[in-house]
Image (tube, grey):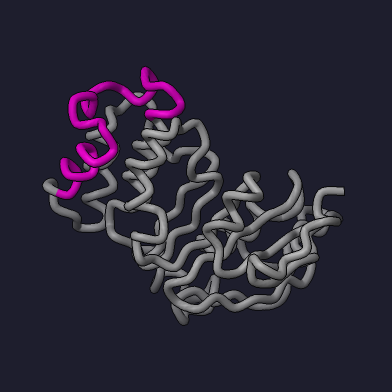
Amino acid sequence: MTRRYGERLALDGVTLSLPAGSTLAVLGANGAGKTTLLRILATLLRPHAGAARVLGAALPEEGWRVRGRIGLLAHDPLLYSELSARENLRFHARLHGVAAARIEALLEEVGLGARGDEPVRTLSRGLTQRVAICRAVLHAPEVLLLDEPYANLDPAAVAAVAPLIGRASGATRVVISHDVEGGLAEADLVLGLRGGRAEVLAPPASADLSGLYR
């Protein structure tokens, strides 16, 4: 895949394949192309050259086939700040035909059952991240695209959300992380991007990241 922003190459001929149920850790410095890759896989951006497939669907042409099977946790929480956590989840539940019981179960699981009616704008970053995680997994997606999923979370919160977005979820996962050690621990395959190019594509045990952050 190749993607440009004007004259700048954000992704430069990145090629990979990820088996179902496995985890890809995407590592690299700021501006390496990590978020661009995630946005293409989420059907939000078109590659300018090459092709992308998610769950067998060619992107972007067949994006409509897979959008309901993808869960995106972006850097922006993608929540309506004036609505409460519960109202945000109800809105997304209607889009996906999800029962109200699922909303309540998720809020309880992440420790927000008693605070679900507070406007998102009044919540801390960590609590907002918990709501965003609930939104991403609300419809039990087969693919999870996660940009720094544990950002702003304390250890107790990480433990609470791990069953939803970690290996226990059973989903195929693409995880952007600035935590190299944590990213390697979660991964079946590591993609190291530098200047939009795949400098590393290997299992964690053999991934040489020595030149990735220079």
Left or right: 30 in relation to 117? right
53 left or right of 77 in image = right
Q: Residue at x 39, y 73 (%)?
A: 65
Q: Is residue 204 left or right of residue 155?
A: right
The question of residue 121 being in magenta is answered with yes
User: Residue drawn at (49%, 41%), measured in percent from left and top?
Assistant: 150
Q: Nearer the viewer, residue 202 or 58?
A: 202
26 within the magenta span: no
Where does residue 200 sit, x and y in percent of width and height?
75, 67
Instruction: Tell me where residue 12 appears, x and y as whole percent.
Output: 79, 66
Residue 16 in the image, given as x and y percentages of width and height? 65, 76
The answer to which image quadrant residue 178 occupies is top right
In which image quadrant can residue 117 be found? top left
Q: Residue at x 38, y 44 (%)?
A: 133
Query: How many numbered discs sit on the rendered protein?
Result: 0
Classify the position of the N terminus by image quarter. bottom right
In the displayed structure, 204 sits above or below 27; it is: below
Q: Which residues are magenta?
A: 102-127
Above-or-below relation of 86 to 207: above
Looking at the image, the residue that sits furthest to the top is 122
Q: Is residue 186 visible?
A: yes
Depth check, front residue: 43 or 177 = 177
Q: Residue furthest bottom?
A: 56
Q: Is residue 28 left or right of residue 195?
A: left
Estimate the x, y position of residue 131 in percent, counting from the top left. 34, 37
